[in-house]
Amino acid sequence: MTIRMASAKADERRAFWDTYGPRDTDPASAWRTLIYEARHLGAIRLERHRLNNASGVRATYDSVSTVLTTLA
């Protein structure tokens, strides 16, 4: 989860990448990145559901679909 969050923005998180080093770009790493993104989107969907935000839940469907299509 740390890698996904560090990748979300290019701000002070740059220090993380300066220390951690560049991300791998091999197929296994790309696959793992998509899995983490799907997990993150699922967490967003659950939180929006918990907050009774139906339109917010619906807004996640396209993003999840894109990730799942890419994984297939």
Image (cartoon, helix red, strand yellow):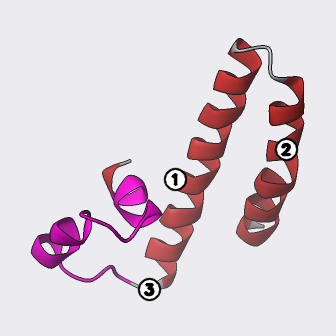
Q: Earlier in the sequence, mark 3 or mark 1?
A: 3
Label 2, residues with CA under 10 Å away: few <14, some 14-19, many ≥20: few
Cα separation, mark 2 vs mark 1, equals 18 Å
What's the residue at 18%, 79% (across, down)? 21
Give residue 59's mark. 2
Q: Secondary structure at mark 2?
A: helix
Front residue (pair 71, 60): 60
Residue 69 placement: quadrant: bottom right
What's the residue at 42%, 65% (across, down)? 9
| Residue annotated with mark 3 | 26
> Which residues are the magenta region?
3-24
Q: State whether residue 67 is above or below residue 29.
A: above
Q: Earlier in the sequence, mark 2 or mark 1?
A: 1
Going by the numbered disc 2, the residue's amino acid type is Ala
Q: Earlier in the sequence, mark 2 or mark 3?
A: 3
| Residue annotated with mark 1 | 36
Going by the numbered disc 1, the residue's amino acid type is Tyr
Going by the numbered disc 3, the residue's amino acid type is Asp
Cα separation, mark 2 vs mark 3, equals 30 Å
Q: Secondary structure at mark 1?
A: helix
Cα separation, mark 3 vs mark 1, equals 16 Å
In which quadrant of the rendered image does the C terminus lie?
A: bottom right
Q: Are marks 2 and 1 in contact (CB under 8 Å)?
A: no
Q: Residue 37, how many percent across, how many down?
A: 58, 55
What's the residue at 44%, 73% (across, down)? 29
